[in-house]
Amino acid sequence: MKKNFVSAQDVAALAGVSRSAVSRAFTPGASIADDTRHRVVMAANTLGYQVNQLARGLMVNRSGIVCLIVTEMDTPYRSRLVRVLTQALQDAGNIAMIINTDRSDESVAQALQQTMRYRADASILLSGLPDRSIVQRCLDNGQRLVLINRDDPIEGPYRINLDDAGAARQALDAFLAAGCRRLAFANSAVGTPSLMAREQGFLEAAQTCGLPVAVARHGATLYQSGTTLAQSLLAGPNRPDAIFCVTDLIACGVMDVARQQFELRIPEDLCIIGFDDIEQASWGAYELTSFAQPITAIADAAMAALADDAPNGLTNQRLNSPLIWRKTVREPS
Amino acid sequence: MKKNFVSAQDVAALAGVSRSAVSRAFTPGASIADDTRHRVVMAANTLGYQVNQLARGLMVNRSGIVCLIVTEMDTPYRSRLVRVLTQALQDAGNIAMIINTDRSDESVAQALQQTMRYRADASILLSGLPDRSIVQRCLDNGQRLVLINRDDPIEGPYRINLDDAGAARQALDAFLAAGCRRLAFANSAVGTPSLMAREQGFLEAAQTCGLPVAVARHGATLYQSGTTLAQSLLAGPNRPDAIFCVTDLIACGVMDVARQQFELRIPEDLCIIGFDDIEQASWGAYELTSFAQPITAIADAAMAALADDAPNGLTNQRLNSPLIWRKTVREPS
DNA sequence: GCTGTCCTTGCAAGCGCGTGCAATGATTGC
DNA sequence: GCAATCATTGCACGCGCTTGCAAGGACAGC
């Protein structure tokens, strides 16, 4: 038994004006006398009236809703991004609707359908890749689409990516400067384009220096993957003295087994570089040197893509991720 | 220049039926011939039609939107709860709208207004406490309100809480069994009811045993607070041999400075118990004994509160948080 | 063959709102 | 004092949808 919300009609009756006047009182820039607006606002307050955004969205063809499509959002990096994005959206007068696609990859398509059902003005994909036909459908319906760190060959939407290869080269330089020569790369098995770009970049940079690198791939981009990756990488005969981990979570897992199981000192015996600069990277137990996700820059770029006057020029933005120096790489002597 | 979405009108034209038929085709249980429904669905698919939930919500007076009001959602516990809640909401045919109230406490009131503007069917507060008048307004308008871990003296909404005091007693028992006698409690300074309940419960339980406990409060419920709390607790003359930390995040901070700065062994020199059982608690660097938030039980309770036939009986649910034994408390010899 | 019942379907009203248009009154310029 | 301009305001329509109501058609029972 749901009661009805207060409507503009009710407010109009109380204020002794027409319903149009109520509407105009809450529409910035509308033609209405200060006195009338004041009376309307007073009446609205006593009644607890709030403009119905559903009906409003119906009229102005702009719901103010932006969908965030995300999987595994309890991951440190993702949750931080979601936090910053929701805040940025609110500041811009929008509101975030969040669609969880943990269940399956096919659920991304469903998510985008859901986002269309609510006539979201835009969708931001933090993970997962939808079918091209669905993407096209969104675009056809005038819905903006922003892809974050999904460096996929897909046309149309705005894309925000990092210079993964550049970061990988920088990681290699750091290892070389620290005197490391037995290189390894710890990757997850998910094969996301951005993750693969880091691996490729690292391998190519090492190749130009004539150095081989041991590559291991396993599981999702989680701590647990790091622990098993470390076991396979560190158990071999030619133990690496430097591991570039595709993700901070993996780096933490690697560090813990390196220290506890193999009794290695970091950075004396083993140098580690991670990626994301999650909060745990700065914790005393890790002090991990890592590339920082430029979260606010990402959010800014996303908001720019959603702006009404979004230029076509920035359709494919590439941001830099600065290397945060902590204590898992030896200082160049 | 926004293009219009395809409407039921368009589908009706293509399928050669009336608008009503289209509507019925997408309304479960509506009176429509299988043949007609099929024709409509075909037409809808070729056009890419999706029911407009905004307009639908306007009619049926049920938007399908549930608002999650949350601050600091990049915290491990919160982000996990948000993840599980969004998934549960989707499974129940709803969708989560998320309102970030990081900015200020007063923004919770604004959040609830926003939630009313979008005619959300319900709001779930994960943090922050709104003014009573706003709460009343939500209830008046038929909007459900669920408070999670906000054990405040506020009438009306559904409340889901933990047995904080019971957990605190259990923590004390564990410490005593481990032979600890110099007890301490590391709390944040935010003074949330649930946090204070843990402190109270611990103090009272200790008092009945005639044991004093050193209490320190500082900062937010974050890792950094743990590091400074440890410094003040461990620097004194009568160093504690057991610290109950109000939160895992704080516990991690405490552990890191205990080990690195005071060179204490855990659990030999110092026993630690945390609360939340965040993912990091299971990491090799911590292996923290902690009380687990019954996240799925919380989500289930929240969903039950949102169900149409929500009974009044469960208006104040109290859940248990099991103690997860790891390695930061000595085994009773 | 006729009536009664049931299943479909279209019509039209209405959900709460924004907005173009015309009407109103107020103000200005001469 | 009168016409012209301007700011305000109400009316009415439409956004895309659901749904009560009545009309139409199919079919069974007599």
Image (cartoon, coloured by chain):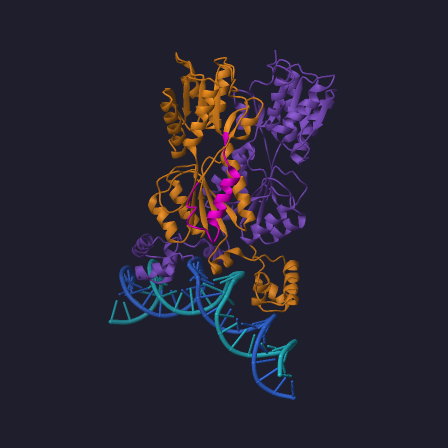
Chain colours: A orange, B purple, C cyan, D blue
Residue B72, above or below B61 = above
Question: x, y (%) of residue B123?
Answer: 56, 46
Looking at this view, is A318 or B284 the one in front?
A318
**Residue drawn at (52%, 42%) of the image:** A85
Which image quarter: residue B68? top right
Which residue is depicted at the point 43% across and 48% down?
A115
Percent from the top left, x then y, of residue B179? 66, 14
Point out residue B232 in the picture as x, y percentages from the top left corner.
70, 23
Q: Which residues are magenta?
A: A291-317
Asked whether residue A320 is in view, the answer is yes
Query: Is any atom of residue B322 visible in this view?
Result: no
Was residue A325 drawn as part of the magenta stretch in this picture?
Answer: no
Quarter occupied by the N terminus of chain B: bottom left
Residue B67 relative to residue B215: left or right: left
In the rendered view, would you say B55 is above or below B206?
below
Quadrant housing the C terminus of chain B: top right
Count every numbered label the image shows and give the total. 0
